[in-house]
């Protein structure tokens, strides 16, 4: 009888812990692109107050600046990913691999570690994108595939535009570029920059549908900075209160383990209410 009670107790305990683990794994992502490593602690306080649990942190030196920032973020239960990206890597990728080796060297020698690498490589930034569009998109997919083959233990995230519908043949399979990206990336961040929940969900609808079908994670981006297409792209004019209302609608419309990422920390902090 005592043995049965013990077994039942252990089963219930395991189930409880398992549910906690599932809950944590299902936590909705609230991220922010952090392009300026000189921002003060008040920005981290703001991030914590606004539910941020991931930061994509651009810091080139990989030294004590990184270590101190990660420690401060982790104290607030925020994971930090190393944010890097150069369009030139689409034509010559060796420098990218050099950067990943630096990342590994840093993580292996510091107790305050990055959680992964967040890559912002945007083919349309290439001066000859219109002429070389197919090749540049192919090269992006090739980078995503080969980085994972070379470094299977690193989590790689990728930022992509919402319009990567070009049919690309890779590894003998022809399909839209965004599908290849979602197939091979650990997570994909859609630059779904529109100033309403409907707009964000509509421009990312194909990526959302494919990610759900393939059981992959996508995160929708929201713009807060001033842009040339301010009327439709950014929440800068509407303000923080309106943006939060719209993002709540987006969060309720996507799976529990997907999420939102804000572009970017400084402009979000400075937004009017």
Image (spheres, grey):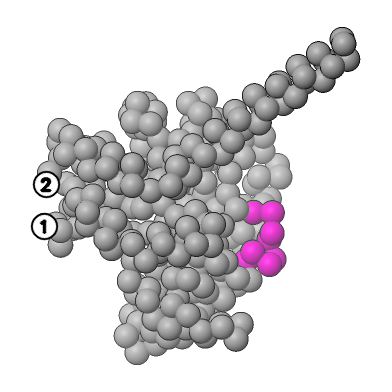
Residue 253: where, in percent of width, then height? 33, 47
Q: Which residue lies at the image location 33% right of the left edge and 52% below the top edge?
A: 221
Which residue does the image show at 16% across and 46% down from the upper left? 236
Q: Are marks 1 and 2 in contact (CB under 8 Å)?
A: yes
> Is 80 positioned to the left or the right of 14 in the image?
left
Q: At 52% from the left edge and 39% from the top edge, which residue is drawn?
A: 26
Q: Which residue is mark 2?
A: 237
Residue 122 position, x and y percent, is 39, 68
**Residue 48 in which image quadrant:** top left
Q: Residue furthest top?
A: 2
Q: How many marks?
A: 2
Q: Is 235 in front, or is 63?
A: 235
Mark 1 surroundings within 10 Å by alpha-carbon count, few (fewer than 14), some (14 through 19), many (20 or more): some
Residue that mark 1 sits on: 231
- The span picked out in magenta is 147-154
For the point 33% across and 61% down, the residue is 204
Disc 2 element:
loop
Query: Seen in the image, is 187 located left or right of residue 52?
Result: right
Choose the circle earlier in sequence order: 1 or 2.
1
- Residue 120 at what x, y percent from top left? 44, 61
Give the quadrant of the C terminus: top left
25 inside magenta stretch: no
């Amino acid at each position: 009888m005592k043995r049965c009670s013990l077994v039942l107790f252990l089963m219930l305990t395991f189930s409880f812990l398992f549910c906690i683990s599932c809950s944590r794994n299902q936590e909705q992502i609230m991220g922010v692109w952090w392009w300026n490593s000189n921002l003060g602690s008040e920005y981290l306080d703001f991030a914590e107050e606004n539910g941020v649990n991931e930061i994509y942190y651009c810091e080139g030196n990989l030294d004590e600046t990184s270590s101190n920032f990660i420690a401060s973020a982790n104290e607030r239960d925020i994971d930090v990913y190393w944010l890097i990206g150069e369009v030139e890597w689409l034509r010559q990728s060796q420098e990218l691999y050099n950067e990943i080796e630096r990342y590994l060297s840093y993580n292996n020698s510091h107790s305050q570690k990055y959680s992964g690498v967040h890559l912002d490589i945007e083919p349309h930034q290439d001066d000859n994108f219109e002429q070389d569009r197919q090749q540049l998109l192919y090269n992006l997919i090739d980078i995503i595939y080969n980085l994972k083959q070379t470094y299977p233990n690193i989590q790689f995230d990728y930022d992509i535009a919402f319009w990567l519908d070009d049919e690309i043949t890779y590894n003998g399979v022809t399909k839209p570029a965004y599908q290849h990206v979602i197939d091979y990336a650990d997570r994909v961040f859609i630059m779904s920059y529109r100033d309403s929940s409907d707009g964000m969900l509509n421009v990312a609808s194909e990526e959302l549908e494919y990610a759900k079908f393939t059981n992959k994670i996508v995160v929708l981006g929201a713009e807060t900075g001033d842009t040339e297409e301010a009327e439709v792209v950014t929440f800068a004019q509407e303000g923080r209160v309106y943006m939060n209302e719209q993002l709540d609608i987006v969060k309720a419309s996507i799976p529990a383990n997907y999420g939102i990422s804000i572009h970017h920390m400084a402009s979000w902090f400075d937004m009017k209410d």
